[in-house]
Amino acid sequence: MQTAQAPVAIDLLIEARWIIPVEPAGVVLEHHAVAVSNGRIVALLPAEDARQRYAPAEFRALDDHVLIPGLVNAHSHAAMNLLRGYADDLPLMRWLSERIWPAEREHVSHDFVRDGTALACAEMLRGGITCFNDMYFFPDAAAEAAIDLGMRAVLGIVVIEFPSAWARDADQYISCGLAVRDHYKHHPLLHFTLAPHAPYTVSDITFERIRTLAEQLDLPVHVHIHETRSEIEQSIEQYGVRPLERLRRLGLIGPGLIGV
């Protein structure tokens, strides 16, 4: 005679009317449950089976909800939500050179980035985003905010050719950013990219160094590309090719490139 197996203790069991997983694609599961233990999903199974198999410390029933995996914000300047709406009626280059870059020189600091990123994280979490790919100054401050809110983040080692409160030149942007990566590289919530700002703010020499570091450290490259017609026209005038072709010639086009 077989004896019934005791339910397995877990932290959380969520039942939902519908669950849409990432894989397999195009599947909608009805009356299923997600079992969570030690911060990880340990099972996705029919709700009736889940009640028999698990003894959760916390139970949630979402009778009229669709449960989906967390969304990913693939490109953000999270701390800039403190500048939301500022001169946003201007063309990009005027907006940057006349308003944003001067405002950043005056206001951006470690505290600015930490507080702005914390606010952005709260907004993203309310919208179902659980991971964001960021590019901004003071990535150490962004790391602190993401960790405090328990949010996954991919933080850019931002590189640009002019000074800011974070660094004075491309070499220092890289060295400061790599120091942040070295400090946090084993943290379970954080990953890093190399983040040259854009073709119009980064030189060929710096791009070549970034390519070498990306290959050595196995890091993706996160860069603005083909944002406006004027950017493309300027690149053709200065380099004889469009920005994307320039990056190809510099060896930066490949699976590890995040072009935004």
Image (cartoon, helix red, strand yellow):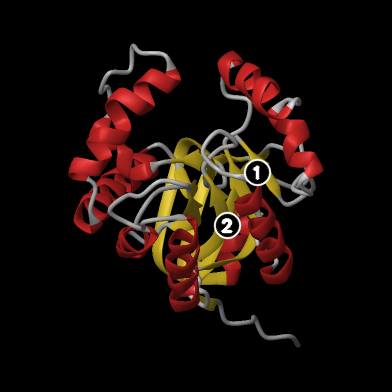
Q: Is residue 248 visible?
A: yes
Tell me the crowding category of disc 2: few under 14, some 14 to 19, or many 20 or more residues within 10 angstroms, Cα based. many
Between residues 215 and 128, which one lies in front from this camera angle? 215
Between residues 113 and 197, which one lies in front from this camera angle? 197
Q: Is 155 rendered above or below residue 122?
A: below
Q: Amino acid at mark 2?
A: Thr
Q: What residue is disc 1 on?
A: 258
x, y percent for residue 137: 37, 52
Instruction: Name the residue at the front extreme.
Output: 238
Quadrant housing the C terminus = top right
Q: Amino acid at mark 1?
A: Ile
What is the spatial separation of the Cα atoms under label 1 and label 2, in whole angstroms? 9 Å
Q: Is residue 26 visible?
A: no
Question: Reading the chain from its start, which is encountered first: label 1 or label 2?
Answer: 2
Q: Residue at x 67, y 20 (%)?
A: 237
Q: Is residue 93 left or right of residue 166?
A: right
Asked which quadrant contains residue 169, the reply is: bottom left
Mark 1 touches mark 2? (CB < 8 Å): yes
Q: What residue is disc 2 on?
A: 193
x, y percent for residue 134: 47, 48
Q: Which mark is residue 24?
A: none
Q: Is 15 rendered above or below residue 215?
A: above
Q: Is 118 rendered above or below residue 105?
A: below
